[in-house]
Image (cartoon, rainbow, N blue to C red):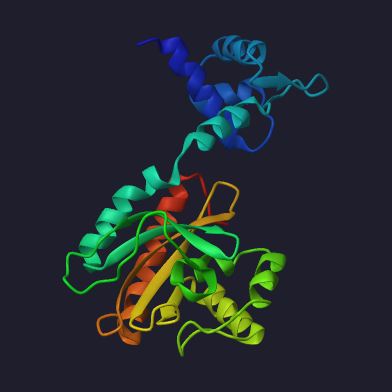
């Protein structure tokens, strides 16, 4: 193993974690290396465009090149691939149908799912759609959507079941409740006998890009059960978000 290469990576990480420009002596002390060694490694980082030296202070700081490389990696992350193990664990834990969806206009698009093993279960298909304000994964994303997107949906609200949200004021209140508790609930608003619970998934910028949730028959997913499982789904969504690069404040 190339020790010089490893020292260079350690130095790069130290600069990244410092949050400020650092001097050679400071870095040498932190990394327990000689000043000449640190200086030589810094010259390599500067030559490759990862660091720069402040001519006035003589201290070193990172450039944006490391961020650019990280952005390339993040761009390659597929939320479906990252979420798959969590869909499987959530399905095993709840024995209900698990969905991963994204918001597409006024609808959610199901991009991954695992069916419940139970004979009576919620039915859906990958590639299928549902009105966003009526299902838990949709509401979990609308709660953090731009005001314009929510306003467009509010202009076209109508009842699919007796439990559907049909007024802008009611939807606004529901989205505020979701932001407060961290998860969304569907109380038979799309299909009268189907309920669900979901939580939002965020990317590295903090934007909500998807939602994960469960759905099942209303006779199994009663209000008490949905309230109990809500925090678990939030934790799963947070784990996926972290793997996508999200760091909570």
Q: Quadrant of the N terminus?
A: top left
Task: Describe residue 183's horizontal placement relative to residue 39 as left or right.
Answer: left
Task: Describe residue 175's horizontal placement relative to residue 231 as left or right.
Answer: right
Depth check: 111 or 159 in front? 159
Task: Describe residue 190's horizontal placement relative to residue 14 as left or right.
Answer: left
Rendered image quadrant of residue 233: bottom left
- Above or below for 128 versus 190: above
- Residue 112 horizontal/vertical position (percent): 37, 53
Q: State the residue at coordinates (67%, 65%).
A: 149
Q: Quadrant of the C terminus?
A: bottom right
- Residue 97 horizontal/vertical position (percent): 28, 65
Rendered image quadrant of residue 155: bottom right
- Above or below for 80 versus 137: above
- Above or below for 151 versus 105: below
- Residue 238 horizontal/vertical position (percent): 44, 57
Residue 32 visible in the shown view: no
Q: How many marks?
A: 0
- Residue 41 horizontal/vertical position (percent): 57, 13
Depth check: 84 or 101 in front? 101
Depth check: 55 or 112 in front? 112
- Above or below for 168 versus 131: below
Residue 90 visible in the shown view: yes
Q: Residue furthest bottom?
A: 162
Task: Describe residue 210's horizontal placement relative to residue 112 as left or right.
Answer: right
């Amino acid at each position: 193993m190339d020790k010089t290469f490893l020292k260079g990576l350690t130095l790069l990480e130290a600069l990244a974690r410092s949050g400020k420009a650092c001097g050679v002596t400071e870095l040498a002390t932190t990394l327990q290396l000689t000043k000449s060694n640190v200086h030589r490694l810094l010259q390599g980082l500067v030559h490759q465009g990862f660091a720069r030296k402040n001519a006035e202070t003589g201290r070193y700081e990172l450039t944006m090149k490391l961020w650019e490389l990280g952005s390339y990696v993040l761009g390659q992350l597929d939320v479906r691939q990252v979420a798959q193990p969590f869909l499987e664990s959530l399905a095993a834990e709840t024995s209900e149908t698990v969905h991963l969806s994204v918001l597409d206009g006024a609808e959610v698009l199901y991009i991954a799912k695992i069916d419940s093993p139970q004979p009576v279960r919620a039915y859906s298909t990958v590639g299928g759609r549902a009105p966003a304000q009526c299902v838990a994964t949709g509401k979990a994303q609308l709660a953090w959507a731009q005001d314009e997107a929510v306003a467009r949906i509010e202009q076209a609200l109508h009842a699919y079941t007796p439990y559907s949200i049909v007024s802008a004021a009611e939807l606004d209140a529901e989205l505020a409740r979701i932001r407060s508790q961290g998860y969304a609930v569907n109380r038979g608003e799309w299909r009268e006998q189907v309920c669900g619970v979901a939580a939002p998934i965020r990317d590295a910028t903090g934007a909500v890009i998807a939602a994960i949730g469960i759905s099942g028959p209303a006779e199994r997913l009663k209000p008490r059960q949905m309230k109990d499982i809500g925090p678990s789904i939030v934790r799963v969504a947070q784990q996926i978000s972290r793997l996508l690069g999200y760091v909570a404040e």
